[in-house]
Image: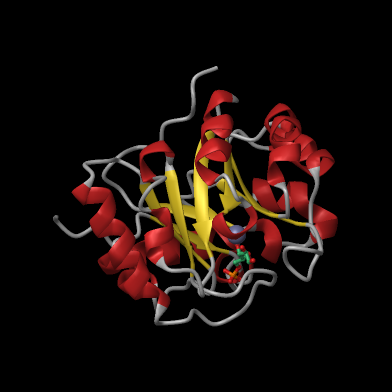
Amino acid sequence: MPRWTPCPGAVHLAPSILAADFGRLADAVHALQGSGADRVHVDVMDGSFVPNFTFGTDTVRSLRKETELPLELHLMIIDPDRHLETFARAGADGITVHDEACPHLHRTLTAIRALDCRAGAAINPSTPAAHLDDVLEVCDLALVMTINPGFGGQRLIARTLGKVERVRAEVERQGLDTEVEVDGGGDEANARACVEAGATVLVAGTAVFGHPGGAAAGGRAVLAAAGDPPPR
Ligand code: DX5
Ligand code: ZN
């Protein structure tokens, strides 16, 4: 199966089910109908790379049956190479790994693509943007963490937006179509700033699933606040 291709030239919303009710995950993904989301962001945590646990391959397999939206996995785990094939078989459309967890990041990204998944590379707030420069050409998505990973509901760290600008500039300098994604603390109030910094994919957990009007209203509100990508 060829890799999933997101519509180019638009701002994309990736709701994070970390902020959903874990007892009702199927309902949560169904509730994204009409939200404007073009993918579901699935945060996988192992209690080692980050101090929290979340989903494994069985959850991914179950989610796969509940939605036609692509599943974008964000692996916050040590030694992700051991599990790439299992997650791909479980139904992942994209797999993002952390630079900090991958000594051979270029190899890992290439392996993800070989599994017909979109390959993503993530950096923590304390990791310089330059860590991505030499892997962007094998990367479908560059994820800049705008919080320290592990928990939803945190406030976006403003300084990280400077790194989004730096990653965006490098993507363009190399003439690539790598997506630039921001993850953590994204909401209606900062969505436009993220897009102006160069993000084209906005992860939002609390702002979507915690919206008083429901997930569909939350997603639409974030996308409306984000607006269109600025001309470059
Ligand atoms: C945190 C996760 C994020 C998180 C975002 O480690 O990677 O995807 O779910 O949630 P909010 O939008 O609530 O910050
Ligand atoms: Zn995430």
Count of labels shown? 0
- Quarter assignment of residue 220: bottom left
- Quarter assignment of residue 174: top left
Q: How is colour applied across the structure in the image?
A: secondary structure
Q: Could you say which is closer to the camera, residue 178 or residue 71?
A: 178
Residue 20, above or below 65: below
Residue 53 image offset from top left, x and y in percent: 81, 62
Residue 142 image offset from top left, x and y in percent: 43, 52
Describe residue 164's horizontal placement relative to residue 44 as left or right.
left
Residue 184, above or below 38: below
The answer to whether any part of residue 165 appears in the image is: yes
Q: Quadrant of the N terminus?
A: top right
Residue 15 image offset from top left, x and y in percent: 56, 56
Residue 171, above or below 151: above
Describe residue 45's horizontal placement relative to residue 211 as left or right.
right
Q: Could you say which is closer to the camera, residue 136 or residue 6?
A: 136
Q: Quadrant of the C terminus?
A: bottom left
Q: Could you say which is closer to the camera, residue 59 or residue 50?
A: 50
Query: Residue visible at 41% across and 54% down?
Result: 132
Query: Residue visible at 57% across and 44% down?
Result: 104
Describe residue 207's horizontal placement relative to residue 91 as left or right.
left
The answer to whether any part of residue 228 appears in the image is: no
- Quarter assignment of residue 20: bottom right
Residue 27 image offset from top left, x and y in percent: 74, 50
Describe residue 100's horizontal placement relative to residue 195 as left or right.
right
Query: Residue visible at 79% across and 52% down?
Result: 55
Q: Residue lying furthest front in this view?
A: 103
Q: Residue lying furthest top in this view?
A: 1
In which quadrant of this rendering is ligand 1 seen?
Answer: bottom right
Query: Residue visible at 69% across and 62% down?
Result: 18
Q: Could you say which is closer to the camera, residue 45 or residue 154?
A: 45
